Amino acid sequence: MVIHHLENADMAQMFDIDISHLDGLDFPAGLGKVAPGERSASHQHDETEMFVIVSGEGTLLVDSHVHAVKAGSVAQFAPFESHVLENTGEVDLIFFLQYRRDAASSARSASSQERQNPARPQFVFSTPPTPNGDLHLGHLSGPYLGADVYVRYQRLLGHPAWHMTGSDDFQSYVAALANREGSTPAEVARHYSQEIRQTLSMMDIELDHYTMTNDADGYAEGAQRFFSRLVASGQVQMREAPALCDKDSGHYLYEVDVAGACPGCGHATNGNICEECGEPNVVTDLDMPVSKASQLPPLKAMVKRYMLPLHQFAETVKAHHKVGRVPARMRELAQRVFSRDSLDVPLSHLSDWGITPAEVEGEGQVIWVWPEMSYGFLWDIEQLGKKVSQPWKADQPDSNWKIIHFFGYDNSFYHSILYPVLYRLAYPEWQPDIDYHHNEFYLLDGKKFSTSRRHAVWGKEILTPESVDAVRFYLCLTRPEQERTNFQLAAYLTELRQTLIGEWQGWLHELGQRTARLFAGQAPDAGIWTKEQVAFWAQLNGHLQCMKNALNSDGFSLRRAAQQLKLLVQDTLIFSQSQQQLAAIPDWKDEYRTSLALELAAAQLLSRIAQPLMPRFSGHLAAALGNPVADDWPQQAEIVTPGNAITLHQINFFSDPDASLDTPHWAWLAGKLTTLLPNVNPQPSQRLSELGATSLMAVTLQYYLLNEMQADIPLDLLLNQPLGKVADEAARQQSSAAKGVTE
């Protein structure tokens, strides 16, 4: 027998508490001690673990859920559950711990949707865009598409999740554009905010709340209260510090007003943040700074502003980074930032565009828009609560909230370093649980997309109801998640034509035709199964599991999800081609019936798992299989309900934007339009209503179509559908009429 006494235990610091090992057992075990008011560091690992509370009392924070524990409590942890033990009593909390490595348990837990379910409200934010221009594909491919797909998937799982964003009205870039255009910042922000909302809608980005910060009643007052909390903490103080001013005008310079070389990486940058390396600057540390207004080296001056000694909060950020999903890129950035001897960050700037602090000494200054944004997320949660009848308050953040941020890497400093510090100062009792999803730059022909330089493919240039899912798919497939990627229009069109039209649509049309020919257009039930078919059935369920892994919160990746959709169709095509050899052999008709049922099952699985990425395509495909649009995530592949009407061959899921240009029907239609509208160069993607056509012109064109093309096209369709679709419909009706005459 071996007796261990706590007072004789050899304790060592592990996870910020005292731990000793117990030798002589067949499994790893030990004793732990947490002093009153102390807590262990948040951590997770691949072993299963058990705590037995021997004495004292406290709380266990497990994946941000709080559980009270006391003497006699036994806690069992699955692999990868994060946990923190806090002593809330007045004496030492003593516990026995035991752990073991079990590969099967860790494998189940790693892919478990239950473990990754926060089981609480999920507030998903895409960084509010600056309203100094519309959204281009670089924007859309990053935070907005990412957050949209994330929320769609979470809702299919039955989890409460909401997508929120808005316009970052008080950016200095808005004021700079207004100055160039002879407008006001408010007018510029309001105009482009509406353009942004329209583009998001065209991209099928569904938003549950959108805040225009300059126009939202009560927003400025809330931001002032938040800032006053920071000042009241004693850490944010008004004090004099070096700043830059224009040599000619004396104008205070920050952000858009000044450029130079980044003190961290040496690349060219504007003031306050470097897009290249992600590190902040305070403008006075720029190498070779230049004022944008005068193009002269600026002058240094001592200016009073509210300052935050950020370098004092390395441990706060480190502790925060142990709680949620924090990519290695964020942790490495934090290491670089906190390796500096000091970093005093101005939280206010001299400007007349923004929200003025409530404090008297803040007169003539505005709250820097980035700290303001940290409050804006809490404001959005409160506004959402009003819509869904929840008592959420911006001034009372709840540890039960799960916050998920989607943003570009150039915003990483603000989201993952500055904001956790501000939250700690404003709400010391709040332990925010935040997941971070970043993207790198999406390049256009090898160069950065740029709103200010107008080097971009704008969303409105490429998005139509017919193209939106193809665009979403391609942006997912090429999304810059771990490294920069490049958009080329020719590459997009190739993917559209070869993959979506050539492979996907070609297979679905041919499958629909076979079903019509062999089974009168109704889904057959599976018959006799061969070993190959059983293997394919297993393969379908494997694709489903891979898609879950790509969309689950821990490993969320749109690139892997889009690639998985491609693999599903490619594997189904291989299976289909191999099974065609049975189609004409009567002795194997029951086996071939199973093959066709399995192909339909693959199409059904495609419609289900493509839904977060390609919602319109998913809905059209479901309808063509005789199904309603699904409102949950599939647990396994399933055979299409026997007898369902299959109309796959009657629907064009994707269309080539240039295809109509090569048809005689388009040439005829374009000629008529040129006659009716001599100054217009019609394109297949345009609508008649967009070309300035009068109702009389529309009726005249309708008459021409009926008399010359035998195409009876309703006036509403003629006015509001893309003209390429009108030409296609005329061709279809003319072809049907010809067949009717022949028959």
Image (cartoon, rainbow, N blue to C red):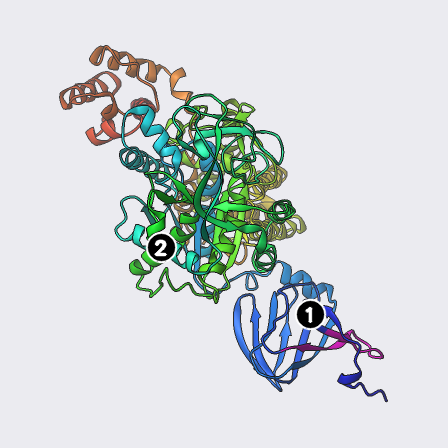
Which is more N-terminal, label 2 or label 1? Answer: 1
Local crowd size for mark 2, using a 10 Å CA cut-off: few (<14), some (14–19), many (≥20): many
Query: In the rendered structure, are the residues bearing label 1 and label 2 in contact, judged by CB atoms less than 8 Å apart?
Result: no
Q: Quadrant of the C terminus?
A: top left
Q: Is residue 215 magenta?
A: no
User: Mark 2 falls on what kind of element?
Assistant: helix
- Residue depth check, mark 1 versus mark 2: number of the one nearer the observer: 2
Q: In the figure, 384 relative to 694: above or below?
A: below
Q: Quadrant of the N terminus?
A: bottom right
Q: Does any portion of residue 420 appear in the rendered image?
A: yes
Task: Residue 469: give x, y in percent of width and height.
Answer: 43, 37
Q: In the figure, 466 relative to 369: above or below?
A: above
Res 3 quadrant in image: bottom right
* Count of marks overlaid on the render: 2
Q: Mark on residue 379?
A: 2
Distance CA(mark 1)–CA(mark 2): 39 Å
Magenta segment boundaries in residue numbering:
19-35
Residue for badge 1 = 48
Q: In the figure, 362 relative to 743: above or below?
A: below
Local crowd size for mark 1, using a 10 Å CA cut-off: few (<14), some (14–19), many (≥20): many
Task: Residue 358: give x, y in percent of width and height.
Answer: 32, 53
User: Quick one: which residue is furthest to the left in this view?
Assistant: 696
On the rendered structure, is 353 left or right of 145? Answer: left
Task: Residue 86: give x, y in percent of width and height.
Answer: 59, 74
On the rendered structure, is 448 left or right of 341? Answer: left
Residue kind at label 2, given as amino acid type: Trp
Q: Does any portion of residue 510 appear in the rendered image?
A: no
On the rendered structure, is 219 left or right of 715? Answer: right
